[in-house]
Amino acid sequence: MSGDRFILLQPGAVRPGRLPLPPAFAVKAMTDDTQGRFSLLEVTLVRDIPRHTHHRADEAVYVLEGVLAIEFDDETLLAPEGSFALLPQGVPHALRRASDPPPRVLQISSPGGWEHYVEDLIEAGPAVLTDGRLDPAKINPIAGKYGISYQEEQG
């Protein structure tokens, strides 16, 4: 029965996962909730996300507040509140904060799995950072399990 999967979250509520996530990551629909079709998170972009590629999933982003900078096709595009971006699988992109306070977005990953990736990153803690920034070389071993690869600096 379809009613078995009905979910209504009150304001500020989140779906429980394997471990508690920081407030910047509010899981609204888990992959298991949608039979694997997608996951939905409300995300506050407290750190810039380096250039990366999703090899298995499309990513959809709707900007709720603030301004999101999207690096796509060697161009930086600004997405203010109310903007929508579809980031198809296989296309490198980066997400950056272009406002203060940082942008708050709805992020949909299809098929799902994004929330499990975030859990693994949070579990890894500061080990994925260098000088307070996400480090592609340190993230890639975790990201690879989810069909994501970050562009590492050449040098």
Image: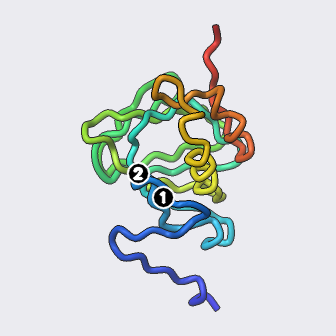
Residue linked to disc 1: 41
Q: Position of residue 67 (x, y in %)?
A: 31, 40
Q: Quadrant of residue 99?
A: top left
Residue 123's mark?
none
Under mark 1, the amino acid is Leu
Q: State the residue lying farthest toward the top.
A: 155
**Does the residue at mark 2 contact the one at mark 1 (Cβ under 8 Å)?**
no
**In this rendering, is residue 137 above or below 90?**
above
Front position in the image: 47 or 66: 47
Residue at 61% from the left image edge and 16% from the top image edge: 153
Q: Position of residue 136 (x, y in %)?
A: 61, 28
Residue linked to disc 2: 24
Relative to 63, is 54 on the left or the right?
A: right
Q: Quadrant of residue 34?
A: bottom right
Relative to 107, is 30 on the left or the right?
A: right
SS of the residue under disc 2: loop
Front position in the image: 23 or 153: 23
Residue at 54% from the left image edge and 33% from the top image edge: 93
**In this rendering, is residue 67 above or below 37?**
above
